[in-house]
Image (spheres, rainbow, N blue to C red):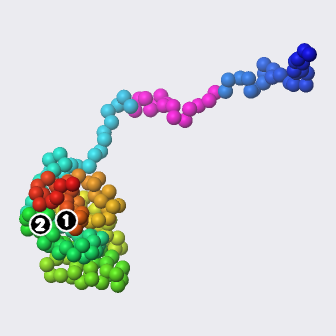
Amino acid sequence: MPKKSKSYKGVKLPTANDPRTKKMKRTNPNAKKPEDKKKETEDEVILAPQANSSLFFTHNEELGPPYHIIVDTNFIKTAIANKIDLVAGAMDCLLAKCTIYITDCVMGEMEKLGRRFRLAVKIAKDPRFERLPCTHKGVYADDCLVQRCQQAKCWIIATGDRDLKRRLRKIPGVPIMYIHSHQFSIERMPEAWGAPKW
């Protein structure tokens, strides 16, 4: 049996004047305009933040004994859980004299958390720790600690908070102290001979 071919009797074919057959003038939104090409050829001035003069590559020359350590809420709570004295643990890690500071934001954050942090607040009020006054509004400690590190590179930040660590790693020359296997450890600080190597 022979195959029947399709019939195109009822189908309209486009004419030469049909707008669908003409090439449409399509513009690419990402295409560079001639004005942009002129701008590229000119010398561009890139404003970069002033590098700190105390940094030698990522090594911070401002850090030296006695070390200044700012403690976070999470770090105090973890140190209590691991039964580590803050001053003794920091001295064992760095093998040097350490001064521990607690900001008003960290103190306010611990007081807000209530009964669970009652012992942490009591330890934070120890006269061996120095208080750093905060002039900004709010009690969000992470922003305060990051801002202090950007202003002066003389601090070591003691924290266990992952988000805060991620933010601090973006700032060159700021060591981070944390607790690992029931002892203090420090990252990004080559002179820490007492810190365990993992």
**Is residue 67 something that shows in the picture?**
no
* Quadrant location of the C terminus in the rendered image: bottom left
Can you identify the residue that label 2 sits on?
A: 92
Residue beneath label 1, please? Answer: 184
Q: Amino acid at mark 2?
A: Asp
Q: Are marks 2 and 1 in contact (CB under 8 Å)?
A: yes
Q: Residue at coordinates 67% horizontally, 27% vertically from top-left?
A: 24
Q: Badge 1, how many Cα within 10 Å: few under 14, some, many 20+? A: many
Label 2 packing within 10 angstroms: few (<14), some (14-19), many (20+): some
In x, y percent, where is residue 186?
Answer: 19, 59
Q: Residue at x 23, y 52 (%)?
A: 172
Instruction: Answer with the quarter of the image where residue 119 lies.
Output: bottom left
133 sits to left or right of 127:
right
Numbered range of the magenta stretch: 25-39
**Can see residue 96?**
yes
Q: Is residue 59 left or right of residue 112?
A: left
Label 1, secondary structure: give it. strand
Query: Is residue 124 rendered to the left or right of residue 19?
Result: left
Image vertical order of residue 64 relative to residue 82, above or below: above
Quadrant housing residue 171: bottom left
